[in-house]
Image (cartoon, rainbow, N blue to C red):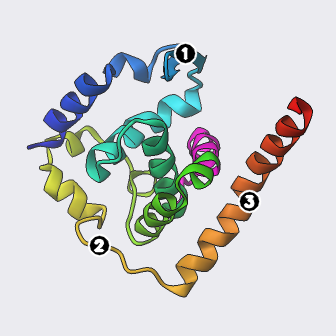
Amino acid sequence: MNVRDARARYFETNGFDEAGYTARWAHFKIGPIPLAFPNTPSRQRALPMHDLHHVATGYPTTLLGEAEIGAWEVAGGCRNYWAAWVLDAAGFGYGVVFAPRRMYRAFVSGRRSKNLYHLGYTDELLGLDVTELRRRLQIDRPPVATWADRAAFAGWLALFAMPVVAAAAVAFALWR
């Protein structure tokens, strides 16, 4: 299947479309609760690549799937896509609380692969076969973790997860 068709299937499955790339608001749900946040120019610039990352990696758009893609993108680096850094950091932070092993696997995969934030997005990518996109991103083979990967995961965990854990602890303390 080519990337264009795979992205169309991804859009259809998740209720997305290309209009989301320029919409003023990003709409999503957490369970039955509808939420929205401003679709900033920075997010609009990163979103086409983020969507193709979902197509290539197979990570779903569930809460944990978004956390996995966040860990994968953080590990590979988001260059100057600031919205990607912020949203991925949030996903990484809550993901390690609920599925630390999945986040670790996604993180190691991200460290061992390339991503479109570095390679760049062009419409030509849509004409590739998904297998070719996966090959170009070097996610066509299982990664092997090294001690450097473990240390990097611990460092990012300290940076991203601790504020989430601290906020949860404060909320829990206030709730009691």
- The local crowd at label 2, few if under 14, some if 14 to 19, many if 20 or more residues have their Cα within 10 Å, is few
Residue type pointed to by label 3:
Leu
Residue 54: horizontal and vertical position, in percent?
A: 34, 44
User: Which residue is identified by label 2?
Assistant: 142
Position of residue 138 in the picture relative to residue 126 (left or right): right
User: Which residue is identified by label 1?
Assistant: 33
**What is the magenta range?**
77-93
Element at label 2: loop
Quadrant for the N terminus in the image:
top left
- The local crowd at label 3, few if under 14, some if 14 to 19, many if 20 or more residues have their Cα within 10 Å, is few
Label 2 or label 1, whichever comes before in sequence order = 1
- From this viewpoint, which residue is outermost toward the left? 1
- From this viewpoint, which residue is outermost toward the front? 176
Residue at x 27%, y 50% (from the top left corner): 56
Element at label 1: strand
Residue 162: horizontal and vertical position, in percent?
A: 77, 55
Tag shown at residue 160: none
Estimate the spatial distance between the alpha carbons at disc 2 and disc 3, rounded to whole Å. Answer: 26 Å
Q: Nearer the viewer, residue 119 or 78?
A: 78
User: Which residue is identified by label 3?
Assistant: 159
Q: Mark 3 near mark 1, Cβ–Cβ under 8 Å?
A: no
Residue 40: horizontal and vertical position, in percent?
A: 59, 25
Residue at x 81%, y 42% (from the top left corner): 167
Numbered disc in front, either 3 or 1: 1
Q: Nearer the viewer, residue 151 or 75?
A: 151
Estimate the spatial distance between the alpha carbons at disc 2 and disc 1, rounded to whole Å. Answer: 36 Å
- The local crowd at label 1, few if under 14, some if 14 to 19, many if 20 or more residues have their Cα within 10 Å, is few
Residue type pointed to by label 2:
Pro
